Image: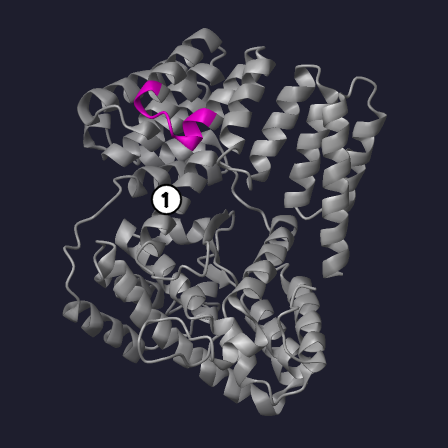
Amino acid sequence: MLLSEINTTSHHRNGFLLKRLLITMLAGTMAAAAVPAPADNRLPTIGDPANSVMTPTAEAQLGSDLMREVRQKMRLVSDPELVAYVEDLGRRLTSHADTPEFHYHFFLVNSNQINAFAMPGGYVGVNTGLILAAENESELAGVLSHEIAHVAQRHMARQMAQAQQVNARTIALVLAGLLLGSQNPQAGSAAVMSSVAGAQQQQLAYSRQHEREADRIGMQILASSGFDPHGMGDFFKELMRASRYQDHPPPFLSTHPMTQERVADAEERADQLHSSGDFSTGLFALMRAKLRVLQAGSPEEAIKHFRNGHSLDQMSEADRFGYALALRKAGDYKQARRILSSLMKSQGENPPYLLAQAELEHAAGRYDEAVKAFDNALSLYPDSYPLRFSYAETLLDAGKPKAAVEQADKLLHAEAQRPALYRLKANAADKAGDVAEAKLAMAHYYRLEGDINSAMSQLRQVSQTADASDIQRSRAKALEREWKKEFNDKS
């Protein structure tokens, strides 16, 4: 069972009901619940009450299960460059979080709403709208640090421990209501109040206390990572100012209640922290520009945004980059090529420019030139996931599916939890004529997407594929047994 570590039969029932309700409510955006934690920044000891409700191992398993539901019910960004950027930024921050109990996973939600959220076990989601709303990388890193602190302090497990005196249905409905509230605050509030009017104030009080704790610990993570610790408070302040005259505040403010006192505390705390405050990946503005192109209603809309009446000489580096991407999307390859070449001459052969250049040649149907561009880029950045993924796509469209499969396999050795990568391998294997391998890859894709029935169907079809090898049939049978056991253990 998912919560097999829980000590009593009652706890087993509570955990199972909670899991089912959480999964049901996860169609909307999620936010971490909260309760008191130790005065220092360390995770609770083995004797902490949170461990009697859910161990870190069980919490990680719950997070993994919930992530499958997220992939089914939410629109996630699959662009490898944007995903890698958020993951790399998250990894820098978590390296200063001192939480070896968790393996963190960061993902990007395709939503204009300004929000971010944490789930049990180290899963942290960021809406694209939040990246577009942030003014600089320290602000984005500040929000991520806040969510990492929710995970590091195990707020959901602690909330459950504090609520042990409430019956199982009350615990589940309170937490499910809080999660639903991150998507629809009115519906979430109604769900909580209708089921536990007496316990609501207690739960919300825990939430406020945890928000303050996440601010404090998150800011320490932010400063230790080399970012400007004022980034967190600056973003909070901007959100409050921007939402002052709105009927419905951004979801982030709904799930992370904000007050002037809290913002003032964040500013005061930032003043006291020692940080060089000058670290930057140098990618934030470029990735935000790329997001604007991807989310624009049309290439013409994106072009208008970046030009904004300015000449190329008057545009910032990021705006010129976004402009080149928009021109490429509009089919103006000549002008886009010229701008990218100019950027590389003045700014150097940065990975985003090299990737954009190679993808431009791909889009223009100049596959030989695209392959050359990728070979050059990978000679400089051989471990770049976005470059290798896009290279495999280019090889596939260039009529070299076997080479594309080889590239996908290389990536899968280190990136085995990416659904998009399995989908790419399946397409390449199918075009290469290896139907059984394509079905095995699709089985992995469906499993990661949370569709266990389709995954099992793909595995069974391997045995029925005429040209499947003995090794492929054995792999399919072994995976079928493994996944069936895993599914039965959790049901």
Residue furthest to the top in view is: 368
Location of the C terminus (image quadrant): bottom right
Magenta highlight range: 379-388
Residue type for callout 1? Asp
Q: Circle 1 sits in a helix, a strand or a loop, which is it?
A: helix
Tell whether 334 sits left or right of 180.
left
Location of residue 1 with respect to 166 vertically, above or below: above
- Residue 356, visible in the rendered structure: yes
Tell me which residue sits at (41%, 54%) in the image: 130
Tell me which residue sits at (39%, 68%) in the image: 245
Residue identifier under label 1: 88
Tell whether 101 sits left or right of 25.
left
Tell me how the rendering is colored: one colour
Q: How many marks?
A: 1
Tell me which residue sits at (23%, 28%) in the image: 311
Location of residue 42 with respect to 317 vertically, above or below: below
Q: Is residue 383 magenta?
A: yes
